[in-house]
Amino acid sequence: MSVKVFLDTNVLVYAVDTTRGAAHNRQIARKIVRDGNFGLSAQVLQEFFVTVTRKIKRPLSKTSALRVVSELSRHDVVPVDASLVCLGIAHSLRYQISYWDGAIIAAAEALGAKTVFSEDLSHGQKYGDVEVLNPFL
């Protein structure tokens, strides 16, 4: 498996968030998703489902969210297994970031992605061979 870009959860959430304040980010996120050469992890899909069904102003129905998760699952998806958990922990210790962010970096590495699109990590920051870019800046 090799992809150009790894998407963090927030990119996918913006792609479906229909609130007025999210319009600019929604447009950017939808273009990224349409371009299609990206990978994900099971962690990202889980976080996406919870966020879009519980945490956004206009939540999706669980059925609609499941449909989106199924569509996204057609892309390369890294499973969360013991190896990924250990790498995520190692990255969190090495780079002084949260475990969840460390797991994102580990999953991106597993897919051979050189770029992670995220607004949660520092724009332009390099973690080994992986660079984080905030596409919403």
Image (cartoon, grey):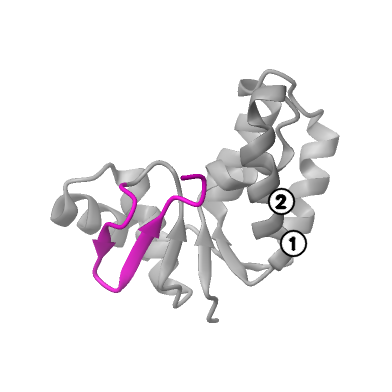
| Alpha carbon separation for disc pair 1 and 2 | 6 Å
The numbered dot on residue 30 is: 2
- Which residue is more in the foreground, 20 or 80? 20
Drawn side of residue 91 relative to residue 31, left or right: left
Residue furthest to the bottom in view is 1
For the residues labelled 1 and 2, say whether their Cβ atoms are less than 8 Å apart. yes
Specify the quadrant that holds the N terminus.
Answer: bottom right
The numbered dot on residue 67 is: none
Q: From the viewer's perspective, is residue 92 above or below residue 20?
A: below
Identify the amino acid type marked 2: Arg
Q: Secondary structure at mark 1?
A: helix
Drawn side of residue 19 relative to residue 137, left or right: right
Residue 12 position within the rendered picture, expressed as x and y whole percent measured from the top left: 63, 46
**Residue at label 1?**
34
The quadrant where residue 47 appears:
top right
Drawn side of residue 105 relative to residue 113, left or right: left
Residue 125 position within the rendered picture, expressed as x and y whole percent measured from the top left: 27, 57
Residue 116 position within the rendered picture, expressed as x and y whole percent measured from the top left: 44, 60
- Which residue is more in the foreground, 118 or 124? 124
Residue furthest to the top in view is 57
Identify the amino acid type marked 1: Arg
Q: From the viewer's perspective, is residue 7 above or below residue 62?
A: below
Residue density around tag 1, few if under 14, some if 14–19, many if 20 or more, within 10 Å: few
- Residue stretch rendered in magenta on the structure: 122-137
Q: At 48% across and 74% down in the image, what residue appears?
A: 111
The quadrant where residue 26 appears:
top right
